Image (cartoon, coloured by chain):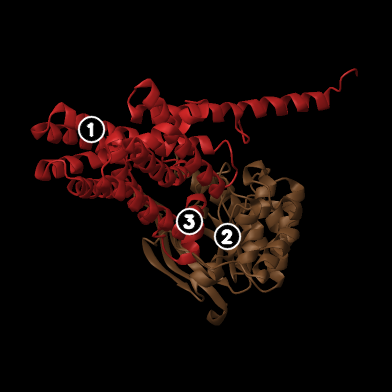
Amino acid sequence: MTGLELLYSPFIEYAFMKRALAGSVALAFAAGPLGVVLVLRRLSLMGDALSHAILPGVAVGFLVAGLSLWAMALGGLVTGLLVAGLAGFVSRVTPLREDASFAAFYLMSLGLGVLLVSLRGSNMDLLHVLFGTVLGLDDAALLLVSMVASVALATLALILRPLVAECFDPGFLRSQQGRGSMSHMVFLVLLVMTLVAGFQVLGTLMVVGIMMLPAASARFWSGTVVGQMIVASVLGALASYLGLLFSFYANVPASAAIILLAGLFYFLSIVLGRTGGLWQAARQMRARRRQLHPAGS
Amino acid sequence: MSLTNALIHLDQVSLGWRDRVALKDVSGTFEKGSLTAVVGPNGAGKSTLLKGLVGTLAPLAGRIRLGFDRVADMAWLPQAGELDRSFPLTVYDLVAMGAWRRTGWWKGFSQSEHARIHQALAAVGLDDFSRRIIGTLSGGQLQRALFARLMLQDAQLLVLDEPFAAVDSATTEDLLQLLQQWHNEGRTVIAVLHDLDMVRSCFPNTLLLAGQVVAWGQTEQVLTPENLHLARHLCAGDYL
Protein backbone atom coordinates (compact mmCIF):
# COMPACT_ATOMS: atom_id res chain seq x y z
CA MET A 1 0.00 0.00 0.00
CA THR A 2 1.38 3.39 -0.90
CA GLY A 3 1.39 6.24 1.58
CA LEU A 4 -1.39 8.00 -0.22
CA GLU A 5 -3.62 4.96 -0.12
CA LEU A 6 -3.30 4.85 3.65
CA LEU A 7 -5.24 8.09 3.69
CA TYR A 8 -8.36 6.83 1.97
CA SER A 9 -8.36 3.05 1.73
CA PRO A 10 -10.11 2.43 5.10
CA PHE A 11 -13.05 4.48 3.88
CA ILE A 12 -13.26 2.47 0.68
CA GLU A 13 -12.74 -0.99 2.08
CA TYR A 14 -14.95 -0.80 5.12
CA ALA A 15 -18.61 0.24 5.01
CA PHE A 16 -18.63 1.17 8.71
CA MET A 17 -15.80 3.64 8.14
CA LYS A 18 -17.65 5.14 5.19
CA ARG A 19 -20.75 5.61 7.31
CA ALA A 20 -18.76 7.01 10.20
CA LEU A 21 -17.14 9.58 7.90
CA ALA A 22 -20.45 10.61 6.33
CA GLY A 23 -22.17 10.94 9.70
CA SER A 24 -19.46 12.86 11.47
CA VAL A 25 -18.79 15.21 8.55
CA ALA A 26 -22.50 16.00 8.26
CA LEU A 27 -22.59 16.69 12.00
CA ALA A 28 -19.46 18.85 11.86
CA PHE A 29 -20.87 21.02 9.09
CA ALA A 30 -23.94 21.92 11.15
CA ALA A 31 -22.29 21.99 14.58
CA GLY A 32 -19.45 24.36 13.74
CA PRO A 33 -21.57 27.38 12.68
CA LEU A 34 -23.92 26.87 15.64
CA GLY A 35 -20.88 26.81 17.91
CA VAL A 36 -19.67 30.09 16.40
CA VAL A 37 -22.95 31.75 17.42
CA LEU A 38 -22.59 30.34 20.95
CA VAL A 39 -19.07 31.76 21.21
CA LEU A 40 -20.31 35.16 20.01
CA ARG A 41 -23.09 35.15 22.59
CA ARG A 42 -20.59 34.23 25.28
CA LEU A 43 -22.62 31.13 25.94
CA SER A 44 -19.87 28.64 25.21
CA LEU A 45 -20.91 26.49 28.13
CA MET A 46 -24.55 26.40 27.08
CA GLY A 47 -23.86 23.76 24.43
CA ASP A 48 -22.37 21.66 27.18
CA ALA A 49 -25.37 22.21 29.41
CA LEU A 50 -27.88 21.40 26.69
CA SER A 51 -26.08 18.26 25.64
CA HIS A 52 -26.49 16.96 29.19
CA ALA A 53 -30.06 18.15 29.27
CA ILE A 54 -31.04 15.81 26.44
CA LEU A 55 -29.81 12.82 28.44
CA PRO A 56 -32.90 12.15 30.60
CA GLY A 57 -35.13 12.33 27.53
CA VAL A 58 -32.90 9.91 25.68
CA ALA A 59 -33.05 7.66 28.73
CA VAL A 60 -36.83 7.75 28.87
CA GLY A 61 -36.98 6.90 25.17
CA PHE A 62 -34.60 4.06 25.86
CA LEU A 63 -36.69 2.78 28.79
CA VAL A 64 -39.87 2.87 26.74
CA ALA A 65 -38.66 1.56 23.41
CA GLY A 66 -35.21 0.10 23.95
CA LEU A 67 -32.41 1.17 21.61
CA SER A 68 -34.86 2.81 19.20
CA LEU A 69 -33.29 5.77 17.50
CA TRP A 70 -36.45 7.79 16.97
CA ALA A 71 -37.78 7.30 20.52
CA MET A 72 -34.48 8.39 22.01
CA ALA A 73 -34.17 11.36 19.66
CA LEU A 74 -37.70 12.53 20.42
CA GLY A 75 -37.13 12.20 24.17
CA GLY A 76 -33.87 14.12 23.92
CA LEU A 77 -35.50 16.89 21.91
CA VAL A 78 -38.27 17.30 24.50
CA THR A 79 -36.03 17.50 27.58
CA GLY A 80 -33.44 19.63 25.79
CA LEU A 81 -36.03 22.25 24.85
CA LEU A 82 -37.61 22.00 28.29
CA VAL A 83 -34.33 22.75 30.06
CA ALA A 84 -33.51 25.58 27.63
CA GLY A 85 -36.93 27.10 28.29
CA LEU A 86 -36.82 26.62 32.06
CA ALA A 87 -33.30 27.99 32.42
CA GLY A 88 -34.19 31.04 30.33
CA PHE A 89 -37.35 31.53 32.39
CA VAL A 90 -35.54 31.32 35.74
CA SER A 91 -32.90 33.82 34.66
CA ARG A 92 -35.61 36.23 33.46
CA VAL A 93 -37.76 36.17 36.59
CA THR A 94 -34.99 35.88 39.21
CA PRO A 95 -31.63 37.63 39.62
CA LEU A 96 -29.80 34.35 38.84
CA ARG A 97 -27.73 34.72 35.68
CA GLU A 98 -28.45 32.54 32.68
CA ASP A 99 -25.23 30.52 32.87
CA ALA A 100 -25.81 29.65 36.52
CA SER A 101 -29.40 28.55 35.97
CA PHE A 102 -28.29 26.47 32.98
CA ALA A 103 -25.65 24.81 35.15
CA ALA A 104 -28.23 23.98 37.82
CA PHE A 105 -30.63 22.42 35.35
CA TYR A 106 -28.08 20.43 33.40
CA LEU A 107 -26.52 18.90 36.51
CA MET A 108 -29.96 17.71 37.58
CA SER A 109 -30.57 16.38 34.09
CA LEU A 110 -27.29 14.51 34.07
CA GLY A 111 -28.09 12.85 37.39
CA LEU A 112 -31.58 11.96 36.29
CA GLY A 113 -30.38 10.66 32.93
CA VAL A 114 -27.71 8.37 34.34
CA LEU A 115 -30.17 7.07 36.91
CA LEU A 116 -32.81 6.35 34.27
CA VAL A 117 -30.45 4.61 31.85
CA SER A 118 -29.10 2.33 34.56
CA LEU A 119 -32.64 1.39 35.61
CA ARG A 120 -32.83 -0.94 32.69
CA GLY A 121 -29.73 -0.84 30.57
CA SER A 122 -26.28 -2.17 31.22
CA ASN A 123 -23.15 -0.08 31.65
CA MET A 124 -22.50 -0.74 27.98
CA ASP A 125 -25.71 1.08 27.02
CA LEU A 126 -24.75 4.00 29.22
CA LEU A 127 -21.38 4.18 27.51
CA HIS A 128 -23.08 4.19 24.13
CA VAL A 129 -25.24 7.12 25.07
CA LEU A 130 -22.40 9.05 26.66
CA PHE A 131 -19.75 8.41 24.04
CA GLY A 132 -21.70 7.52 20.92
CA THR A 133 -21.31 4.78 18.39
CA VAL A 134 -19.73 6.52 15.45
CA LEU A 135 -18.38 3.22 14.09
CA GLY A 136 -21.80 1.57 14.30
CA LEU A 137 -24.08 4.05 12.54
CA ASP A 138 -27.04 2.35 10.87
CA ASP A 139 -29.12 3.77 8.04
CA ALA A 140 -31.64 5.40 10.35
CA ALA A 141 -28.96 7.18 12.36
CA LEU A 142 -27.19 8.35 9.23
CA LEU A 143 -30.46 9.63 7.83
CA LEU A 144 -31.26 11.49 11.05
CA VAL A 145 -27.87 13.17 11.25
CA SER A 146 -27.79 14.27 7.62
CA MET A 147 -31.39 15.44 7.74
CA VAL A 148 -30.90 17.48 10.89
CA ALA A 149 -27.64 18.93 9.62
CA SER A 150 -29.28 20.06 6.36
CA VAL A 151 -32.27 21.59 8.11
CA ALA A 152 -30.06 23.29 10.67
CA LEU A 153 -27.79 24.86 8.06
CA ALA A 154 -30.65 26.02 5.85
CA THR A 155 -32.54 27.52 8.79
CA LEU A 156 -29.40 29.16 10.13
CA ALA A 157 -28.95 30.86 6.76
CA LEU A 158 -32.53 32.17 6.95
CA ILE A 159 -32.16 33.65 10.45
CA LEU A 160 -28.53 34.72 10.14
CA ARG A 161 -29.13 38.45 9.75
CA PRO A 162 -31.40 38.96 12.79
CA LEU A 163 -29.34 36.48 14.81
CA VAL A 164 -26.10 38.37 14.24
CA ALA A 165 -27.76 41.75 14.75
CA GLU A 166 -29.31 40.60 18.02
CA CYS A 167 -26.04 39.10 19.19
CA PHE A 168 -24.16 42.33 18.61
CA ASP A 169 -26.74 44.89 19.70
CA PRO A 170 -30.00 43.46 21.11
CA GLY A 171 -31.41 46.90 21.89
CA PHE A 172 -31.04 47.97 18.27
CA LEU A 173 -33.04 45.10 16.88
CA ARG A 174 -35.77 45.59 19.47
CA SER A 175 -36.05 49.26 18.55
CA GLN A 176 -36.26 48.41 14.86
CA GLN A 177 -38.86 45.68 15.13
CA GLY A 178 -40.79 46.87 18.13
CA ARG A 179 -40.29 43.51 19.82
CA GLY A 180 -37.67 40.95 20.64
CA SER A 181 -36.59 38.71 17.83
CA MET A 182 -37.73 35.13 17.34
CA SER A 183 -34.31 34.27 16.00
CA HIS A 184 -32.89 33.32 19.40
CA MET A 185 -35.70 30.81 20.00
CA VAL A 186 -35.23 29.29 16.56
CA PHE A 187 -31.53 29.10 17.21
CA LEU A 188 -32.10 27.21 20.48
CA VAL A 189 -34.29 24.69 18.68
CA LEU A 190 -31.59 24.17 16.02
CA LEU A 191 -29.03 23.73 18.76
CA VAL A 192 -30.99 21.06 20.61
CA MET A 193 -31.86 19.31 17.33
CA THR A 194 -28.21 19.13 16.32
CA LEU A 195 -27.12 17.90 19.74
CA VAL A 196 -29.80 15.20 19.67
CA ALA A 197 -28.66 14.06 16.23
CA GLY A 198 -25.06 14.29 17.35
CA PHE A 199 -25.39 12.07 20.40
CA GLN A 200 -25.83 9.11 18.04
CA VAL A 201 -22.52 9.88 16.43
CA LEU A 202 -20.25 11.13 19.18
CA GLY A 203 -22.36 10.65 22.32
CA THR A 204 -23.84 13.31 24.57
CA LEU A 205 -20.49 14.07 26.22
CA MET A 206 -18.42 14.38 23.06
CA VAL A 207 -20.86 16.05 20.68
CA VAL A 208 -20.20 19.44 22.27
CA GLY A 209 -16.55 19.06 21.34
CA ILE A 210 -17.22 19.05 17.61
CA MET A 211 -19.38 22.12 18.18
CA MET A 212 -17.18 24.29 20.39
CA LEU A 213 -13.58 23.37 19.52
CA PRO A 214 -13.79 24.27 15.81
CA ALA A 215 -15.82 27.37 16.68
CA ALA A 216 -13.22 28.54 19.18
CA SER A 217 -10.45 27.82 16.65
CA ALA A 218 -12.27 29.71 13.88
CA ARG A 219 -11.94 32.94 15.81
CA PHE A 220 -8.22 32.89 14.99
CA TRP A 221 -8.71 32.60 11.24
CA SER A 222 -11.45 35.01 10.20
CA GLY A 223 -12.70 38.43 11.20
CA THR A 224 -16.29 38.00 10.06
CA VAL A 225 -19.13 35.86 11.36
CA VAL A 226 -19.70 34.01 8.10
CA GLY A 227 -15.98 33.48 7.60
CA GLN A 228 -15.72 31.96 11.07
CA MET A 229 -18.67 29.69 10.37
CA ILE A 230 -17.06 28.34 7.20
CA VAL A 231 -13.74 27.82 8.96
CA ALA A 232 -15.48 26.04 11.85
CA SER A 233 -17.29 23.67 9.49
CA VAL A 234 -14.13 22.84 7.55
CA LEU A 235 -12.04 22.34 10.68
CA GLY A 236 -14.73 20.09 12.19
CA ALA A 237 -14.94 18.00 9.04
CA LEU A 238 -11.16 17.75 8.85
CA ALA A 239 -10.95 16.70 12.49
CA SER A 240 -13.60 14.04 11.84
CA TYR A 241 -11.70 12.64 8.88
CA LEU A 242 -8.29 12.62 10.54
CA GLY A 243 -9.74 11.41 13.83
CA LEU A 244 -11.39 8.43 12.18
CA LEU A 245 -8.19 7.59 10.31
CA PHE A 246 -6.18 7.82 13.52
CA SER A 247 -8.65 5.66 15.41
CA PHE A 248 -8.54 3.09 12.60
CA TYR A 249 -4.78 2.68 12.57
CA ALA A 250 -4.07 3.23 16.24
CA ASN A 251 -7.10 1.23 17.35
CA VAL A 252 -8.40 3.87 19.76
CA PRO A 253 -12.02 5.00 20.38
CA ALA A 254 -13.18 7.06 17.40
CA SER A 255 -15.17 9.79 19.13
CA ALA A 256 -12.31 10.54 21.50
CA ALA A 257 -9.87 10.64 18.58
CA ILE A 258 -12.08 13.10 16.67
CA ILE A 259 -12.40 15.44 19.64
CA LEU A 260 -8.67 15.27 20.35
CA LEU A 261 -7.90 16.12 16.73
CA ALA A 262 -10.26 19.10 17.01
CA GLY A 263 -8.37 20.01 20.19
CA LEU A 264 -5.08 19.82 18.29
CA PHE A 265 -6.48 22.21 15.65
CA TYR A 266 -7.49 24.50 18.46
CA PHE A 267 -3.94 24.69 19.81
CA LEU A 268 -2.53 25.14 16.30
CA SER A 269 -5.00 27.98 15.74
CA ILE A 270 -4.00 29.72 18.95
CA VAL A 271 -0.36 29.63 17.91
CA LEU A 272 -0.55 30.09 14.13
CA GLY A 273 -3.91 31.89 13.69
CA ARG A 274 -4.03 34.82 11.28
CA THR A 275 -6.20 37.05 13.47
CA GLY A 276 -4.86 37.26 17.00
CA GLY A 277 -2.68 34.12 16.99
CA LEU A 278 0.44 34.14 19.16
CA TRP A 279 2.93 33.86 16.31
CA GLN A 280 1.34 36.70 14.40
CA ALA A 281 1.23 38.84 17.53
CA ALA A 282 4.91 38.22 18.16
CA ARG A 283 5.77 39.08 14.57
CA GLN A 284 3.80 42.31 14.71
CA MET A 285 5.49 43.22 17.96
CA ARG A 286 8.92 42.65 16.38
CA ALA A 287 7.99 44.71 13.36
CA ARG A 288 6.81 47.55 15.54
CA ARG A 289 9.98 47.46 17.62
CA ARG A 290 12.07 47.62 14.46
CA GLN A 291 10.02 50.59 13.30
CA LEU A 292 10.65 52.46 16.52
CA HIS A 293 14.33 51.52 16.80
CA PRO A 294 15.72 51.18 13.27
CA ALA A 295 18.87 49.04 13.26
CA GLY A 296 22.07 51.03 13.41
CA SER A 297 20.56 54.18 14.82
CA MET B 1 -46.36 74.91 24.58
CA SER B 2 -48.99 73.78 22.15
CA LEU B 3 -49.93 70.14 22.27
CA THR B 4 -50.03 69.83 18.49
CA ASN B 5 -46.30 70.36 18.42
CA ALA B 6 -45.63 67.67 21.01
CA LEU B 7 -43.66 64.68 19.82
CA ILE B 8 -43.51 62.92 23.17
CA HIS B 9 -45.72 63.79 26.11
CA LEU B 10 -45.03 62.35 29.54
CA ASP B 11 -47.79 62.36 32.12
CA GLN B 12 -46.65 61.64 35.70
CA VAL B 13 -44.42 58.85 34.51
CA SER B 14 -42.48 56.70 36.99
CA LEU B 15 -39.81 54.36 35.73
CA GLY B 16 -37.70 51.81 37.49
CA TRP B 17 -36.54 48.28 37.98
CA ARG B 18 -37.93 45.46 40.03
CA ASP B 19 -36.43 46.60 43.29
CA ARG B 20 -36.06 50.34 42.84
CA VAL B 21 -37.85 53.33 41.39
CA ALA B 22 -35.20 55.21 39.44
CA LEU B 23 -37.29 58.13 38.30
CA LYS B 24 -40.62 59.34 39.60
CA ASP B 25 -43.34 61.71 38.52
CA VAL B 26 -41.93 62.95 35.24
CA SER B 27 -44.34 65.21 33.37
CA GLY B 28 -43.52 67.27 30.33
CA THR B 29 -43.16 67.46 26.60
CA PHE B 30 -40.48 66.94 23.99
CA GLU B 31 -41.43 69.25 21.14
CA LYS B 32 -41.16 68.27 17.51
CA GLY B 33 -37.82 69.47 16.13
CA SER B 34 -36.36 70.25 19.54
CA LEU B 35 -32.77 69.59 20.55
CA THR B 36 -32.73 68.54 24.20
CA ALA B 37 -29.89 67.57 26.50
CA VAL B 38 -30.66 65.27 29.42
CA VAL B 39 -28.25 65.94 32.28
CA GLY B 40 -27.93 64.96 35.92
CA PRO B 41 -25.59 63.25 38.40
CA ASN B 42 -24.84 59.54 38.23
CA GLY B 43 -27.88 57.52 39.19
CA ALA B 44 -30.23 60.37 38.32
CA GLY B 45 -32.24 58.14 35.99
CA LYS B 46 -31.05 59.55 32.66
CA SER B 47 -30.55 56.20 30.95
CA THR B 48 -33.71 54.91 32.60
CA LEU B 49 -35.70 57.74 31.05
CA LEU B 50 -34.28 56.97 27.61
CA LYS B 51 -35.13 53.29 28.00
CA GLY B 52 -38.68 54.34 28.81
CA LEU B 53 -38.87 56.56 25.72
CA VAL B 54 -37.40 53.85 23.51
CA GLY B 55 -39.85 51.34 24.90
CA THR B 56 -37.47 48.78 26.40
CA LEU B 57 -38.80 49.68 29.86
CA ALA B 58 -42.52 49.95 30.57
CA PRO B 59 -43.56 52.76 32.96
CA LEU B 60 -44.44 51.69 36.51
CA ALA B 61 -47.01 54.47 36.58
CA GLY B 62 -48.24 57.26 34.33
CA ARG B 63 -48.40 57.46 30.56
CA ILE B 64 -46.00 58.17 27.73
CA ARG B 65 -47.86 59.47 24.68
CA LEU B 66 -46.02 59.40 21.38
CA GLY B 67 -46.86 61.55 18.38
CA PHE B 68 -45.09 59.18 16.00
CA ASP B 69 -44.56 55.54 15.21
CA ARG B 70 -41.98 54.29 17.66
CA VAL B 71 -40.66 51.61 15.36
CA ALA B 72 -40.54 53.53 12.10
CA ASP B 73 -39.44 56.96 13.25
CA MET B 74 -37.04 56.44 16.11
CA ALA B 75 -33.33 55.71 16.10
CA TRP B 76 -31.43 54.84 19.24
CA LEU B 77 -27.74 55.12 19.97
CA PRO B 78 -26.72 52.79 22.81
CA GLN B 79 -23.83 53.55 25.17
CA ALA B 80 -20.75 52.34 23.34
CA GLY B 81 -19.75 50.39 26.43
CA GLU B 82 -22.75 48.12 26.00
CA LEU B 83 -21.41 46.79 22.71
CA ASP B 84 -18.98 43.89 22.35
CA ARG B 85 -15.93 45.44 20.67
CA SER B 86 -14.43 42.04 19.82
CA PHE B 87 -17.46 41.06 17.72
CA PRO B 88 -16.41 39.94 14.21
CA LEU B 89 -18.19 42.60 12.19
CA THR B 90 -16.89 44.97 9.53
CA VAL B 91 -17.54 48.70 9.75
CA TYR B 92 -19.54 48.46 6.54
CA ASP B 93 -21.83 45.75 7.95
CA LEU B 94 -22.29 47.69 11.18
CA VAL B 95 -23.47 50.75 9.26
CA ALA B 96 -25.59 48.56 6.97
CA MET B 97 -27.58 47.44 10.04
CA GLY B 98 -29.13 50.90 9.93
CA ALA B 99 -31.07 49.91 6.82
CA TRP B 100 -32.98 47.31 8.84
CA ARG B 101 -36.38 48.93 8.33
CA ARG B 102 -35.96 48.67 4.58
CA THR B 103 -34.21 45.31 4.27
CA GLY B 104 -35.58 43.25 7.15
CA TRP B 105 -34.52 39.64 7.59
CA TRP B 106 -33.90 38.66 4.01
CA LYS B 107 -34.11 41.43 1.46
CA GLY B 108 -30.95 42.24 -0.46
CA PHE B 109 -29.23 45.60 -0.48
CA SER B 110 -30.07 47.68 -3.54
CA GLN B 111 -27.63 49.94 -5.36
CA SER B 112 -29.13 53.01 -3.72
CA GLU B 113 -28.78 51.38 -0.29
CA HIS B 114 -25.07 50.77 -0.92
CA ALA B 115 -24.75 54.36 -2.06
CA ARG B 116 -26.40 55.54 1.15
CA ILE B 117 -23.98 53.51 3.24
CA HIS B 118 -20.98 55.00 1.44
CA GLN B 119 -22.47 58.45 1.86
CA ALA B 120 -22.94 57.94 5.60
CA LEU B 121 -19.39 56.58 5.96
CA ALA B 122 -18.06 59.63 4.14
CA ALA B 123 -20.10 61.96 6.32
CA VAL B 124 -18.48 60.63 9.50
CA GLY B 125 -15.03 60.45 7.91
CA LEU B 126 -14.70 56.68 7.77
CA ASP B 127 -14.60 56.15 3.96
CA ASP B 128 -11.33 54.27 4.17
CA PHE B 129 -12.40 52.09 7.05
CA SER B 130 -15.35 50.25 5.53
CA ARG B 131 -13.61 46.83 5.34
CA ARG B 132 -12.03 47.14 8.79
CA ILE B 133 -13.16 44.90 11.64
CA ILE B 134 -14.76 46.96 14.42
CA GLY B 135 -12.32 45.50 16.95
CA THR B 136 -9.51 47.45 15.26
CA LEU B 137 -11.25 50.81 15.64
CA SER B 138 -10.55 53.35 18.36
CA GLY B 139 -13.40 54.39 20.64
CA GLY B 140 -13.94 57.56 18.65
CA GLN B 141 -13.99 55.73 15.32
CA LEU B 142 -16.52 53.23 16.63
CA GLN B 143 -18.72 56.11 17.74
CA ARG B 144 -18.42 57.62 14.25
CA ALA B 145 -19.53 54.31 12.76
CA LEU B 146 -22.53 54.21 15.10
CA PHE B 147 -23.44 57.73 14.00
CA ALA B 148 -23.28 56.57 10.39
CA ARG B 149 -25.70 53.79 11.31
CA LEU B 150 -28.01 56.42 12.83
CA MET B 151 -27.91 58.38 9.56
CA LEU B 152 -28.93 55.31 7.62
CA GLN B 153 -31.97 54.85 9.84
CA ASP B 154 -33.23 58.21 8.65
CA ALA B 155 -35.48 58.62 11.70
CA GLN B 156 -37.47 61.64 12.90
CA LEU B 157 -36.49 61.15 16.55
CA LEU B 158 -32.92 60.40 17.55
CA VAL B 159 -32.25 59.22 21.10
CA LEU B 160 -28.58 59.15 22.11
CA ASP B 161 -27.21 57.72 25.35
CA GLU B 162 -23.91 59.46 26.21
CA PRO B 163 -22.77 59.92 22.62
CA PHE B 164 -19.57 61.72 23.60
CA ALA B 165 -18.37 59.59 26.49
CA ALA B 166 -14.82 58.34 25.89
CA VAL B 167 -14.45 60.25 22.63
CA ASP B 168 -11.66 62.75 21.85
CA SER B 169 -12.39 66.40 21.23
CA ALA B 170 -11.92 66.32 17.43
CA THR B 171 -14.45 63.49 17.13
CA THR B 172 -16.80 65.24 19.52
CA GLU B 173 -16.68 68.34 17.36
CA ASP B 174 -17.40 66.42 14.15
CA LEU B 175 -20.26 64.45 15.68
CA LEU B 176 -21.70 67.52 17.34
CA GLN B 177 -21.86 69.11 13.91
CA LEU B 178 -23.87 66.11 12.67
CA LEU B 179 -26.27 66.59 15.59
CA GLN B 180 -26.69 70.24 14.62
CA GLN B 181 -27.28 69.24 11.01
CA TRP B 182 -30.00 66.78 12.05
CA HIS B 183 -31.55 69.49 14.21
CA ASN B 184 -31.51 71.90 11.25
CA GLU B 185 -33.23 69.25 9.12
CA GLY B 186 -36.12 69.39 11.55
CA ARG B 187 -35.42 66.14 13.36
CA THR B 188 -35.92 65.82 17.10
CA VAL B 189 -32.81 64.97 19.10
CA ILE B 190 -32.62 63.85 22.74
CA ALA B 191 -29.14 63.18 24.14
CA VAL B 192 -27.76 62.26 27.56
CA LEU B 193 -24.70 64.42 28.18
CA HIS B 194 -22.19 65.21 30.93
CA ASP B 195 -20.35 68.24 29.60
CA LEU B 196 -22.39 71.19 30.82
CA ASP B 197 -20.37 73.72 28.79
CA MET B 198 -21.24 71.81 25.65
CA VAL B 199 -24.90 71.76 26.68
CA ARG B 200 -24.86 75.51 27.27
CA SER B 201 -23.31 76.28 23.90
CA CYS B 202 -25.11 73.77 21.66
CA PHE B 203 -28.38 72.60 23.17
CA PRO B 204 -31.37 75.00 23.30
CA ASN B 205 -33.33 72.79 25.73
CA THR B 206 -32.26 70.89 28.81
CA LEU B 207 -33.88 68.40 31.14
CA LEU B 208 -32.14 68.20 34.52
CA LEU B 209 -32.81 64.97 36.39
CA ALA B 210 -32.05 63.72 39.89
CA GLY B 211 -34.42 60.81 40.48
CA GLN B 212 -37.12 63.28 39.46
CA VAL B 213 -37.34 66.35 37.24
CA VAL B 214 -35.35 69.18 38.79
CA ALA B 215 -35.92 71.55 35.90
CA TRP B 216 -36.95 71.28 32.26
CA GLY B 217 -36.94 74.04 29.67
CA GLN B 218 -34.58 76.52 28.07
CA THR B 219 -31.02 75.65 28.89
CA GLU B 220 -29.98 78.92 30.54
CA GLN B 221 -32.98 78.77 32.85
CA VAL B 222 -32.37 75.13 33.74
CA LEU B 223 -28.63 75.07 34.35
CA THR B 224 -28.56 77.62 37.19
CA PRO B 225 -26.24 77.10 40.16
CA GLU B 226 -29.28 76.60 42.42
CA ASN B 227 -30.76 73.85 40.24
CA LEU B 228 -27.42 72.07 39.88
CA HIS B 229 -26.87 72.20 43.62
CA LEU B 230 -30.36 70.85 44.22
CA ALA B 231 -29.75 68.00 41.76
CA ARG B 232 -26.52 66.99 43.47
CA HIS B 233 -28.20 67.16 46.84
CA LEU B 234 -31.18 65.04 45.74
CA CYS B 235 -28.97 62.34 44.30
CA ALA B 236 -26.57 62.22 47.23
CA GLY B 237 -29.53 61.76 49.58
CA ASP B 238 -30.13 58.34 48.06
CA TYR B 239 -26.84 57.05 49.27
CA LEU B 240 -26.61 58.62 52.73
The chain letter of the red chain reads A
Helix, strand or loop at disc 1? helix
Left or right of residue A223: residue A113: left
The x and y percentages for residue B120 are 70, 62
Q: Identify the residue shown where x is 44% and y is 45%.
A: A29
**What's under tag 2, amino acid-wise?**
Met
Q: Nearer the viewer, residue B230 or B28?
A: B28
Q: Residue furthest right?
A: A297
Left or right of residue A60: residue A254: right
Res B97 label: 2
Q: Identify the residue shown where x is 62% and y is 36%.
A: A275
Q: Say if residue A92 shows up in the picture.
A: no
Q: CA distance from mark 1 to mark 3?
A: 34 Å
Tell me which chain the residue with mark 1 is part of: A
**What's under tag 1, amino acid-wise?**
His
Left or right of residue A144: residue A225: right
Helix, strand or loop at disc 2? helix
The x and y percentages for residue A196 are 28, 45
The x and y percentages for residue A214 are 47, 37
Tell me which chain the residue with mark 2 is part of: B
Helix, strand or loop at disc 3? helix
Q: Identify the residue shown where x is 25% and y is 40%.
A: A53
The residue identified by callout 3 is: A160
The residue identified by callout 1 is: A128
**What's under tag 3, amino acid-wise?**
Leu
Tell me which chain the residue with mark 3 is part of: A
Q: Nearer the viewer, mark 3 or mark 2?
A: 3
Image position of A2 with respect to B123: above or below = above
